[in-house]
Amino acid sequence: MDTPSDNVIPPSARFYVSSNYILPADDDERIRLNTQHGMMKAAFENRLVLAPVILKPGDRVLDSGTGAASWLLDFANEVPSTVSIYGVDISSRLFPSDPPSNIQFLAGSITQLPENWTSTFALVNQRLLFAGLSATAWQAAFSEMYRVLEPGGWVNLCELNCDVDYLDFEYGPAVKKTMILVREIFRSANVLADAVYHLAGWLEQAGFTNIHTEMRRIPLNGDEGRPMRENSCSVYVAMKTPAMKAGGFGLVQSEAEYDDLVQAYGEEVAVTDNAALLNYTISAQKPSSSSRL
């Protein structure tokens, strides 16, 4: 029997809320998400929202796929308590237990929000749902965002590239094999590793205007890249369960081989010149004079 190394969590120890979402929802994931939030915020000059929204007392903000509410709780500290903030996620397992009074949480999907939310939000934020939404679900999500936003309201999206074909640095064999494996894991769940490159077009199809994209590179190599490198390796370890359930896609034959590959990825990317994750923020506006719901 293969014995996991000290820094590898056995798949049986992780909790997955859905076969359509390839990452777990447990205490280890809560810690990882909170750490990841800080790195992604820093990448965009500590700005939580790039959309040029100006919030007024009584405005409502929605955080889609809120998870452990890392972004939402940070955002709540930056706006007056007269702004109502809602977090929605397919699972309530990671919701904070004692949120401020102007914060509410709802277990549900961005693809089917409450009917009475139509035209009630000034801002919808969503971060890193590329591992949970199919192409069809993305388009349904944007339709729902459009519906629940007030005329003139904004969406603020943050997503990463996770497709080997879009890496912008010269990578070695371990990075290549790992990223091909990750892409296959995504495909097995009917989600897109390259979703970020489709979002602007889908937003436009949904009726949004003033679509703006910014990209930042988050280093993976050297001492500077250690935090995101360790975070990425934790993500790939957490994907072991769906990978092994699918038989390893002809790329790995056992849990031990999977663990060895992720370790080799980390070691290789640490010494790879210019290695980085591509982090994108996309903002878009619902037209002020829109006649659509």
Image (cartoon, grey):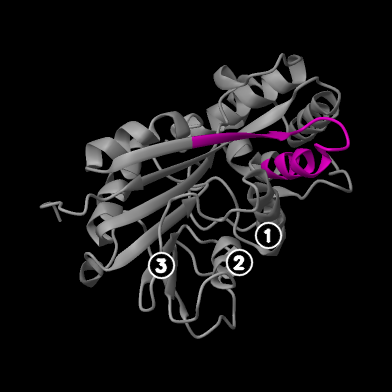
In front: 150, or 115? 150
Residue drawn at x 52%, y 47% as measured from the top left? 128
Query: Can you give x and y, in whole percent of width and height, for residue 183 in the image?
Result: 55, 27
Task: Estimate the x, y position of residue 61 in percent, counting from the top left.
Answer: 40, 67
Marks 2 and 1, the one that precedes in the sequence: 1
Q: Disc 3 or 2, which lies upstream in sequence?
A: 3
Could you tell whether 151 is left or right of 15 in the image? left
Q: CA distance from mark 3 to mark 2?
A: 16 Å
Q: Quadrant of the N terminus?
A: top right
Q: Which residue is mark 3?
A: 55
Residue 266: quarter of image:
top right
Element on which disc 2 rests? helix
Which numbered dot is residue 90? none
Q: Which mark is residue 34?
A: 1
User: What range of the chain is rendered magenta?
Assistant: 214-235
Q: Position of residue 10 (x, y in %)?
A: 75, 49
Q: Residue furthest bottom?
A: 101
Kindly identify the residue that appears in the image at 42 percent across and 68 percent down: 107
Amino acid under disc 3: Leu
Compared with residue 151, is residue 278 higher up or lower down, i.e. above or below? Answer: above
Q: Which residue is mark 2?
A: 74
> Of the residues tagged 3 and 2, which is closer to the observer?
3
